[in-house]
Image (tube, rainbow, N blue to C red):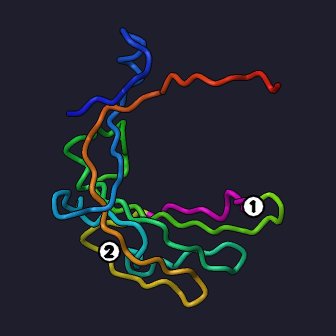
Amino acid sequence: MRRPFRGPAGPAGRRTRRPGFPLTPARDTRPPIGASRLGGPALLEPGTPWPDHEGVPLNLLAVLDTDALAPWLTADDLPVRPGLLNFFHQYEADGAQGHSIAPEACRVIPARPRRAEVVPAPAEATAFAPVPLHTRPVVSGPQVLGYDCDPA
């Protein structure tokens, strides 16, 4: 396992380390990891409604296949297993501030893989082209970053 972890050393550092999974587009030399992908249709169980916020359908950003990650995880790392996680989000324009997001405008909807069905986005939602994802396990943890707090 590659170890890019650059956090605290010693016992304190070992206690904060967790499995990590950088997600990158799949290629010929980097195969997709299960059904994980950016965009595309949702993978929802029958009868699960497409989520919305104040009547506006959310956009599906990604599907994460936790079954494909299961060999590297424990129940403490990702308790929703086996399964699929559908990540939904809605941006709201906020003028000079760019984009803001209300917590209610984000959803993660789990689905059991054997029951999940392909559900295309409603016409009012933005449908992103699917991009299959690749990952590899790494060690992750808090990073020690330096920055200058002097406002001058």
Outermost residue, left direction?
A: 29
Front-most of 93 and 87? Answer: 93
Residue in the picture at 49% in, 81% down: 127
> Would you name the residue on which mark 1 appears?
98
107 falls in the magenta region:
yes
Outermost residue, front direction?
A: 152
Which label sits in the foreground, 1 or 2?
A: 1
> Would you name the residue on which mark 2 appears?
116
Closer to the chain start, of discs 1 and 2, is 1
Residue 67 percent coordinates (x, y): 25, 56
- Circle 1 SS class: loop
- Circle 2 SS class: loop
Residue 9 percent coordinates (x, y): 38, 12
Query: How many numbered discs?
Result: 2
Residue 65 percent coordinates (x, y): 30, 60
The amino acid sitting under disc 1 is Gly
Residue in the picture at 50% in, 61% down: 108
Q: Quadrant of the N terminus?
A: top left
The amino acid sitting under disc 2 is Ala
Which residues are the magenta region? 98-109
